[in-house]
Structures are given as structure tokens and as C-alpha cells.
Image (tube, rainbow, N blue to C red):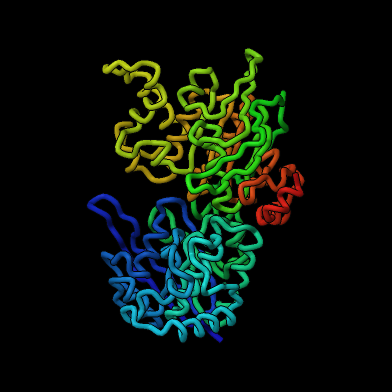
Amino acid sequence: MEKQPAIELKNITKRFGKTVIANKNVNLTAYRGEILSILGENGSGKTTLMNMISGIYFPDEGQIFINGEEAVISSPKDAFDYKIGMIHQHFKLVDVFSAAENIVLGIDEGKYNLKNSIGEIKKISEQYGFDLDVEKKIYTMSVSEKQTVEIVKVLYRGADILILDEPTAVLTPQETEKLFSILRSMRDDGKCIIIITHKLHEVLSLSDRVSVLRKGEYVGTVNTAETNEAELTEMMVGKKVNLNIKREEPKNVEDRLIVDNITCVDRLGATILDKVSFTAKSGEILGIAGIAGSGQRELLESIAGLQHLSSGEILYLDAKTGKTENLRDKTPMQIRNMGVRLSFVPEDRLGMGLVGNMDIIDNMMLRSYSRGHSMFLKRRKPKDLAMKIIHDLDVVTPNAFTPVRRLSGGNVQKVLVGREIAASPTVLMVAYPVRGLDINSSYMIYNLLNEQKEKGVAIIFVGEDLDVLVELCDRIMVIGSGRVTGIVDGRTATKEEIGLLMTKSKQEGEDNG
């Protein structure tokens, strides 16, 4: 039986201002009873295209057909009327409400019978295999539970066309496989599933067809069973790309940073880091894996001098002098004045890493400003550094005087990583450095980290893609509920093993030592 088109896009064009064309003459079809993946580099127009289907944007040109009939979708409400639901990467839930309250929120102007609604929600959950506690508050939920609420919310509103933006970004392998099972079940029920993702192995595992965009234009669609990672990458980039992450054996390994039994408590008295201990070694990449919110951010901030610790020590071993310095509760300035060459690339690029309204040159100066407080700052060296980073890392920008907030996420990350590496660190900490980046930018970051490893830098890499952690890192430390639940060899560990360590309970972490 021939599948029926659920959505047809014909010559869709979307402009922002006079110069930016996000989508140009895109033609795309998604069918009922299929899972269609949308691939493309950063800035290729994937999310913009899906936002037009879901009513967030309105196309400047072209037509959208739903079930064979032309549709005008000028708001999210219009999209819901056409039974279209989009699950965004950043969830849109009210933390203090329960799952059921979030699911029915906004329906019939709030005039609903929650008891009857709960019965319908449970029916949907049972039909597709969701494990959902309808009375549980959002703020007590894991990331996967919140995602479940978002999916059930659009199903409750009658959606039979579902769009998911990077749905596995922060899920464990076990949670990812459970989600895939549910999506396959919904596909088999005749629903149309569209997924935006960067993870090629997941595309090949889950989807029936793959459509590729490049620089806002439609490149083509292939059957998943008839393609591979290399072909898809070439379609996205326009040329062949080496998808192998090199991992040299560590050389001249020495202890560089010893984190000894540190504990961190927040202002409400909750323990965020609980007796965490590990050693970062020169010439080695130490990966850190864990479910989002397990203490990864606080751990790096503690080392960088941005978090107060309740107990424990952070010892830096200077290779040149042989001295050991305790960094606990030192400010970033004090750490620098001690001669400790520590660089930190935080996950919040434009909050902690760079100043969005400042240009690239001025953001270079943030690293050197403390060396001289003269009101007449010399810009030559920062300008030279900015130009070198733009050239070496292929930063796409009109010029070095462009505010960094106007750059794409990938280019912002290149500027930030380039600046921190230029400081010639002996310890380099990076948190989710390739989050949301396309393949080209991601592999450029991996290569930069490997170059620093070969120079003898001790690298701490917090990541969320377990495939990358296993392929890139020499050792992988897993954090669960603020505790170390295990440290494994990157060469022999499996994603499943790491995934189980990520979900270990606090007590199991204690037993693990």
C-alpha cells in the first residue's frame, strides 16, 4: 500500500532581513507511517524550516500542504489545529506544576476536568509504552521524564505529525533506545515523525528516510537502508569528510591535577558534589559522563575558582617547579597569579565564556586585561590573536570587530576554544564543547583537543555523546547524583556500561568507591 503524504513543502523560502536567507526554495515531503530525519550543518535551515511547519515562523514564499490540502499555518495554535506538534530541545514546561497539569495547560482556556484528563493521559501512556507519573512535579523529574511529558502533551492535543528537535541530546543510551522504541510504535500506528539531529548513528538506526539541507537549500532525500555515514556527511558538507577521531597513546604521563574528596553544597543546603576524587594527567584526555545536572558544571567551576567547597582539596602539580599548589577556594585571579596555567571553556558560551556585545578582539583582551589596568589598553596583540583564530579555525565572520553574539553557535565556540588554547594551558577544561555544532566544527574541536594532548596538556572533557567519549577519551569518569560512580578505560568501555554507571544510585556510588 502506497504511503500517504502527511506534509508537503513546495518552494519554501524564509528570509531574515535583507541579507539572510535561512531557507531557499525547499521542497520536502514527509509521509504517514514513517520516521524522517532532517540533517544539515549549523545554519543549514533545519530548525527554521520546522518552525514554519509548527507555526513559529511564516514562510515568505512557497506553500505547505497537510494531507494533500494547502494549509496556512500562522501560529502554533494553527499547527495544533492541523494536528502538528513540535517537541523543542529546550522544554517548555512549568516546573511547579505536575505532569498532568502541564499536559492540559492552555486547553479550553483552562476550563478542564483534571480527573477525566488524567484518565485520557494514562490511556495514551499505556498505548505507546510511556512510563509517566501524572502527579509528579516537573522540578523533580529527570530530563527523559520531562521529554515524556512534552511528547504526551502533543499527543493529548491530538497530534499525528510530531517534530522532535535533538531529542537525544542529554539522554543515556538506555533512555535513547526506549525513546526510539516508542517512536517506532507511533510510526507503526500511522503517525508521521520528523526528527532533527546531528547524530548520524542514530539517524541510521531509527529513521526510514533522511532529507539533507545545506546552506538553506534542499540537497536530497535518501532511504536510510541504502546509505551510510560517509554519504550523509558528504551530502551535508558538500565534500568528503574524515569521520575518524584519532586517539594516540598518552606519552610522558604525569599527575597534573589531583581532586581529593571535594564536597560542594548549594545555598539551599543540597549536596551537589559529594566526596568527588580523581586525577587528571598530562598528555591524557579524561572524559566526564553523566546525566544532565549530576554536578558536572559545579565540578569544573570548583576547579576554576568559581565555586566554594565545603571540604576537600584541589592540588595542582607544577611540572616546572615541582611545587604543589592547593587551588581550593582560590579566585580565578589568585589561581592565575600563582602561575597555574588553567583554561576553562564553560558550557555557557555567551554567559560565562564570552561577552556577546563585545567584538572578537575585545573578547581576546578579557584574557590579558588583568596584566595591566591602564585605561589605554593595547589592542595590537589581542587583534593579532583574533585574526589568527579567525584564520586558523575558519571562523565565519564579517571581520574581527563583529560582536560575538552575531556569530553562529559553532563560530562562537571556535572563538572561545581558540582563546583558551592560546593561553598555553597545562590544564584545559571543556564543558560540552561541541553541543549543537555541525560535523565539521565538531571534528575541528576534537582535533584541537588532541593537539593539546600531544603537547602534554591535561584535558578534562565533559561530554554528552557517549560515542564521542568512547572514541576520544583515554579514561572516562562517570558522575551520578554528585558522586563518582566509576572510572573506565575509554579503549575498552562500552556505551551500555557507561549508561548503567550514569543511572547508578547514590548508595551504589558509595559501594563503588
Of the pair 177 and 71, the residue shown nearer to us = 177
Of the pair 229 and 254, the residue shown nearer to us = 254
Residue 180 pos. (x, y %): 60, 68
User: Height in image: 58 above or below 33?
Assistant: above
Of the pair 124 and 398, the residue shown nearer to us = 124
Q: Residue furthest left?
A: 18
User: Height in image: 38 above or below 355?
Assistant: below
Q: Quadrant of the N terminus?
A: bottom right
The structure residue drawn at horizontal position 55% and vertical position 37%, both measured from the top left corner, is 300
Q: Give left or right: position of 213 versus 52.
A: right
Quarter-of-image position of residue 173:
bottom right
Q: Residue furthest top?
A: 321
* Residue 13 visible at all: yes
Quarter-of-image position of residue 362:
top left
Q: Quadrant of the C terminus?
A: top right
Tell how many labels: 0
* Residue 468 visible at all: no
Residue 461 pos. (x, y %): 59, 39
Of the pair 29 and 443, the residue shown nearer to us = 443
Residue 387 pos. (x, y %): 38, 27
